[in-house]
Every structure is written in C-alpha cells, then in structure tokens.
Image: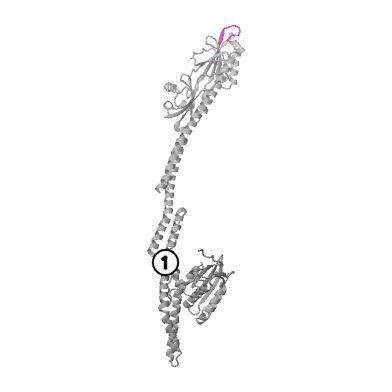
Amino acid sequence: MRAFVLVALVPAILLAGLAFVKARAALQAEIEQSLVTQAGAVAADLDKLLFERLQNAAIWSQLEVMQDLQVQDVDRRLSSFLARLREGYGGVYRELSAADPNGRIVASSEPAALGKSVGLFPVWQQVHLGGATLDLSLPRAAGPDDAGTLLIRTPIASRFDDALLGELRLRFDWGQVNDILDRAAGDDRMVAVVDAGGRLVAASQSLRKRGLTETDRRDGLKALPQKNGAYVLDGTPLDASTVAVGVGRAARFAGFDGVGWRILVVEPLDLALAPIHRMVAVSLMLLGALVIATLVMASWVSAAIARPIVALTEFTRRYRRDGKLTAAPPGGSGEVEELATAFVDMVAHIDASQRNLVRASKLAVVGEMSSVMAHEVRTPLGIIRSSAQMLQREPGLSPEGREMTGFIESETERLNRLVSTMLDSARPRAPVFVPTDVHVLIHQCLGLLAGQAARKQVQFSEALEAADPVVEMDAEQMNQVLLNLIMNALQILHEGGQVQASTADCGDELEIEIADDGPGVAPEERDRIFEAFFFRREGGVGLGLAIVQQIVQAHRGSIVAAESRLGGAVFRIRLPRHVEPEKS
C-alpha cells in the first residue's frame, strides 16, 4: 500500500507543482505582453485624439474669418463662427475664443467671456504642426470630480503685414481623455498618462479615486520605467503590493511625433494571477480527493492481492493437516491467478502422485501375496477340492456328509477365484485393442447375469443412445469391467432393485454408465472406492474396483462414481473411440 501511495501521489504532487510554476510563469508573461500591447493601443488612441485637436487649431487659425480680429470683431461674425464650430463638435470643446495681443477676449463661443482678460498659464507642451506653433497648457490638473481642460493656443497672423493679430484659444474637454482611459482600464486594470517629467496628466477612474492627483503621489511616478516594455514593480505608489506595469508610447502618426507622454497600464499581480490561485485551490482539493481515492484504491488492491494469497495459504494448510484436497481457492486475477492455478495444480499432482504411490504399494503387496498363494495356497486348495469331490462319490456317505463336502468344494472354489483375482490385479496384461461394439458387449454381460438378477428380483434395463457404439478396446478386459460393476450392483441391491446400463456420444469419446437405485456411495468415499483393499460390503476384499480402474486407465479412459438419476450410485466410464499406440 505504501508503494502504491508513493507511486500515485509523489508524481502527482510533483506534476501539480511543476504545472503551477509553469502556468504561473506563462500567465504572467501573457499578462505582461497584454499590458504592453494595451499601453501602445491607448497611446495611439490618445495621440490620434490630440492630433485632431491640434490640427483643428492649426487650420482654424489660418482661416480668413480670423482676420476680423483687426476690426475687433465689430460685426460679431467671428464669435458666431466659433459658436457654430463648438456646437458642431458636440461638446469636444468647452470654449473656442480669440484674444487680441493685450490678452483681451475679442470673440468667443461664450458671449459672457467677451471683453474679459485671459490669464497667463505655463506652457506644458509646444508642438509645431502644419506651419503653426501650438502651445498646450494644463490650467487645472485632472481630478476625481473635475476632468479639467486642455488649453490649446496658436497665434493668428495678419495677412496684410507681419503683425500679430492675437491668438486662437481652444479649451479642449480633458474628460474625453479620461473616458478613453476608463474604457481601457476595465475592472482589474489601471491606466495612467505620465508626461516626460513624470507628471500625472490623466488617469483612469480607479486611480483618480485613490487620490493619485496629489502632488506627493504624482512625484512617485517619476521613478517608473521610461522605455516601452513590461515590468514587475513595487506597487506602493499605487496602493498595491506588487504590480505588473506595461509601458507604451505611440508610433509617429501622420507626421505627428506626439507630446512625449507615456501610457502606463497597471494590474496588481494578485488580481492578475487569481486564476492560477484558484487553480491551485482546485488542485489542492483534487489532490486531497486523489489521496482519499488512492488510499481506498490501495486498500482494495492490497486486499485483492492478499485475499487469494491468504486463501491459497489456507488451502495448503488444510491439505497438509487433513491430507485431502478441498475446493480450489479463488485465484484473483493476473499473475496472482496464474500463481494460484499453478500451485493448486502442483498440489493436485502431488496428491495424485501420493495416491498412485499408495496404490502401487498396495498392488505390490497384492503381488507378493499372490505369489505366495500361487505356490503355497493353490496346491493345497486343489488337493482339498479333489478330496471333496472323491468323497462325494462315496456310496455310503450320509446326507450331512454330502452337504459338508459341497461346502468344502464351493469354498475352495471361492478361494481359488480370490487367488486368481489377486493375480490378475498384480500382473495385468496389456490390452489388445480391437474395434468392438459396446452395445453387443453390454447385451452379453446383462445376459450372463440375468439368472442371478431374476433370483434376486432385480430388473435390468438399457438406454443405449450412442449413435456409434464401436470403440477400440480389449473386449475380454472390458467384459470383466462391465461384469464387475453389474455384479457389485447386484450384490448391494435388495429385492426389486433396478440396474440400468446406458451409453451416449461425447465427441471423440463414448460414455458408458452403470446405474442402480441402491444406497449409493457417500461423496467423501467416491474417490477412495477405487483404492485397493477399500471396501464397505461385508465379505469383500476391495480389489474389484481397483482392477476396474486399472483396466479403464489402460484403455486411456476414465471412470468416476457419482449419484445416479435412479437415486443410487452410477459408475461413468469414458473411453476414446480410437487409441493411438504408445511410442516406444
């Protein structure tokens, strides 16, 4: 289980950690690239917006209507023109006006401003465009409540001499710049516009609400990078721990080099990497689930591996303790199943070898006894039998004497048959295989024992269903097998019993059954009844079935004892139809 856990969890943890590091680095690189790209796009939008306003100023200052400044716009034609321009641009400009060289407003889109003196504002930027010089001033910085204005001033020259008639003043609504920044910022990012001196000139709403229009905070922006690119910086000036900053400037646009400002797109790394942090949280939960699933799976696998091994161990112990083969234990699967199968086969082979050894030992004893009987018993038995037969021919023998001599003759005959049986079992001859009709053989055996069956009122029946009853066999030996089985049934049955002989086709084999309705054979004795000297019937010696099995095995067949359909015992023999000769 420990190995399973280590194999499953350690690689998972290492892979999860590696995936987190790689994903974090990849996401951060993607975020930084996105910030730089967005900064450049915002810079391009602002430069385009400013270029249009500056171009307006440069073109309008050279219009013929501007010459009305020489007559102080007495017919108010210039003021009307400026009012129509302001209205036509739909709020882009807060005020359009023209002032004389003394700083007094002569014409304006706002009638209330006429005659007023203009203040002096420091020049923020000076731009040359279309032959005109334009001064840009920020009279009021961008703040959270007032977006402010950008004042664009350009001189108006006389067409008749080199005199200066005054200047055209455009008060551009700076809130449009902030609107662009707000749209670019979205929910998680902050966008700021910083001039070459590090002064904050515009900011998205989130920064304006943080009070970054304050002087001390604006000064902190001077330390921000000057070159285009992505940076990871301390976010203290922006009230954040660590921030990713994308710096961008717009490329040259229609001959306009811009005003030198930088666009800063800022995103706190904590917010930017939130998907990775969520992924880590999900990964930790999945890892926890994996740990639990691994422990459950490891427990199940360990039990699945150990269970068949424990069962195999118990199977071995029972065999060693009882000396009997029990049902094979469940083998599990895979290599464990192969191991269990091989081990059970080995134990079964050992058990069969032991049984064969015991059988061989018993048959060896039978052989030794048979040899003794052949030399030491048969001769006296022959003398006794001959003497009994001679006594029976005596004319003056009493009826009791004749009965006793009859007993002597029958018992000596029985002993002689016993000796013959033991000799046959000890020294069986090799079968001579000849094609034989099994049905004819069964008919003959039942006919031979019909008289004994009639005396015992036992009924013989046949169910010969084999389509091809011809089998290569030794007819004499197989006749001995069938007679032995039928006689065993006759000896154990009471009056009115039944014995049935049947055959059936089983592929390349023929099946023969001798069944009865007697007491049957106990399941625990069905294997032992074929052992030599094992018997339950009074007067038996336990050699008949041993000889039967020996003959059947010599015919390459098998014999088993089971419960018959009649309720008693059935002996089922299977013989191959064709026997291949053994190779020497």
Of 52 and 329, nearer the camera is 329
The residue sitting at 45% across, 92% down in the picture is 395
Of 472 and 312, nearer the camera is 472
> On the image, which quarter does residue 64 sit in?
top right
Q: Is residue 161 magenta?
A: yes
> On the image, which quarter does residue 365 sit in?
bottom left
Of 559 and 490, nearer the camera is 559
SS at mark 1 in the image = helix
Q: Is residue 313 magenta?
A: no
**What coloring was used for the rendering?**
one colour
x, y percent for residue 245: 47, 27
> For this view, does 503 lie left or right of residue 538?
right
Task: Examine the rendering and report whether any part of residue 277 can be seen.
Answer: no
Of 26 and 272, nearer the camera is 26
The residue sitting at 58% across, 22% down in the picture is 90
The magenta region covers 157-169
Q: How many marks?
A: 1
Q: Pick out the residue farthest to the bottom.
A: 396
The residue sitting at 47% across, 54% down in the picture is 333
How busy is the neighbourhood of tag 1: few (under 14 within 10 Å), some, or many (20 plus)? Answer: few
Q: Pick out the residue farthest to the top.
A: 161
> On the image, which quarter does residue 379 sit in?
bottom left
x, y percent for residue 500: 53, 74
Which residue position holds label 1? 357
Task: Examine the rendering and report whether any part of residue 347 can be seen.
Answer: yes
x, y percent for residue 577: 56, 67
Amino acid residing under circle 1: Leu
